[in-house]
Every structure is written in C-alpha cells, then in structure tokens.
Image: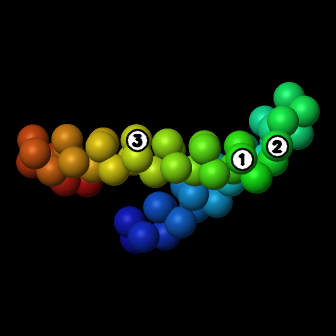
Amino acid sequence: MEYSIYGFALFFLIVLGALAAKTGGSSIIKAIIRITFWGTVAMGLTALVGYLFGVNL
C-alpha cells in the first residue's frame, strides 16, 4: 500500500510541477525535476522522523 501512495504522490508532484511551470511561463522539465526531487526529499525526511519516533500507520 505504501508503494502505491508513494507512486501517486510522485505522479501528482509531476502534474503540479508541470501546471505551475505552464502557469508561470517557466521551463516545464526543470520545474518537474525540481518539484519532484524536493517533494521526494520531504517525504523521505518525514518517513525518517516517523521511523525515529516509532510512528507506524
């Protein structure tokens, strides 16, 4: 289940990155890479903190 949640989160990060770049007139590829990378880093740090504090969902 957690893999599907991660997959959907990445998919929507890609969609939102493309939408934001299109709206702002920026490079779509750069925005997708930037938003997906930092979104993945944020999810990883959140998972790490949850692991350190013993939180399981």
Disc 2 target residue: 27
Q: Residue at x 21, y 48 (%)?
A: 48
Q: Above or below — where is 20 with respect to 30?
A: above
Residue neighbourhood size for the residue with mark 3, other residues' Cα within 10 Å, grouped as few (<14), some (14–19), many (≥20): few
What is the three-letter code of the residue carrying label 1? Lys
Q: Is residue 41 left or right of residue 20?
A: left
Q: Above or below — where is 10 with respect to 38?
A: below
Disc 1 target residue: 30
Q: Mark 1 and mark 2 in contact (Cβ < 8 Å)?
A: yes
Task: Indicate the position of residue 27 as horizontal and vertical percent values.
Answer: 82, 43
Total numbered labels placed on residues in the image: 3
User: Which circle's residue, 2 or 3, is located before the other in the chain?
Assistant: 2
C-alpha gap between disc 3 and disc 1 = 18 Å
Q: Quadrant of the C terminus?
A: bottom left
SS for dot 3: helix
Q: Nearer the viewer, residue 31 or 11?
A: 31
Q: Nearer the viewer, residue 45 or 26?
A: 26
C-alpha gap between disc 2 and disc 1 = 5 Å
Task: Indicate the position of residue 52 as horizontal and vertical percent values.
Answer: 10, 45
Q: Look at discs 2 and 3 and give the one toward the viewer.
A: 2
Q: Mark 1 and mark 3 in contact (Cβ < 8 Å)?
A: no
Q: Quadrant of residue 22?
A: top right
C-alpha gap between disc 2 and disc 3 = 22 Å
SS for dot 1: helix
Tell me the tag on residue 42.
Answer: 3
Q: Quadrant of the N terminus?
A: bottom left
Residue neighbourhood size for the residue with mark 1, other residues' Cα within 10 Å, grouped as few (<14), some (14–19), many (≥20): few
What is the three-letter code of the residue carrying label 2? Ser
Q: Above or below — where is 52 with respect to 57?
A: above
